[in-house]
Amino acid sequence: MRLVMVPPVLAGILVLAGLVAACGGRATAMPAGAQQVHVAVNEAGVSLSPAVVPAGDVYVVLDTPRSSVFFVQGQRAAADTPGPLSDDELARIALNGDSQGTSMESFDQIGCSDEQRAADLGQMGPCGNVSHVVLSPGKYAIAIGDVMAGKPQSLAILEVRP
């Protein structure tokens, strides 16, 4: 799965660019016993399992083929390391798509063939369905829909505890 950190303005452009990108490279497996968060996308929206995890290494597993989600973190300045979102930032994103002060990463398998997705299932890499993130305590959002054109179609909150 491609994990791309982008400024919010470029997020929509990169999703479109992914439609024509070809998968390549080598996929790698998750470590045994790794903390996983499964992301499912369906007509009802986006859901997480589990929705609460301990801080540290987290492997985000996109369970729905051909779906695309945005992982949203707080980022006050370009030089800052992304981190958790405040409750005010979560409300702004959910109510009107206001992504100011955030950093977004697109998780998807767009541009990969069915054969490539099948070969890399359960692995990290351009056509795999797993991405690795290191998270500190707080709240993070996973959104679907055009978050650049208004409020997200659906938003799930990932709570990270110490």
Image (cartoon, rainbow, N blue to C red):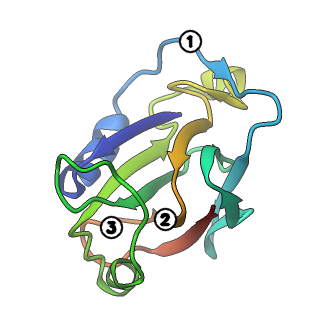
- The spot of residue 137 in percent (x, y) is 54, 62
Compare marks 3 and 2 and give the one earlier in the sequence: 2
Element type where label 3 sits in the image: loop
State which quadrant residue 29 falls in. Answer: top right
| Crowd rating for badge 1 (residues with CA inside 10 Å; few <14, some 14–19, many 20+) | few
Q: Which mark is residue 26?
A: 1
Q: Do the residues labelled 3 and 1 touch (CB within 8 Å)?
A: no
- Note whether 158 is above or below 17 in the view shown: below
Tell me if 160 is positioned left or right of 70 in this view.
Answer: right
- The spot of residue 81 in percent (x, y) is 31, 48
Seen at 35% across and 84% down, the residue is: 88
Q: Residue 147 carries which label?
A: 3
Q: Mark 1 and mark 2: span between their CA atoms?
A: 28 Å
- The spot of residue 152 in percent (x, y) is 40, 73
| Crowd rating for badge 3 (residues with CA inside 10 Å; few <14, some 14–19, many 20+) | many
- The residue indicated by pointer 2 is 140
State which quadrant residue 58 falls in. Answer: top right
The mark tally for this picture is 3
Tell me if 146 is positioned left or right of 26 in this view.
Answer: left
Compare marks 1 and 2 and give the one earlier in the sequence: 1
Seen at 45% across and 31% down, the residue is: 111
Which-is-in-front pick, marks 1 and 2? 2
Q: Which mark is residue 114?
A: none
Residue type (three-letter) at the residue carrying disc 2: Tyr
Q: Which of 155 and 78 is in front in this view?
A: 78
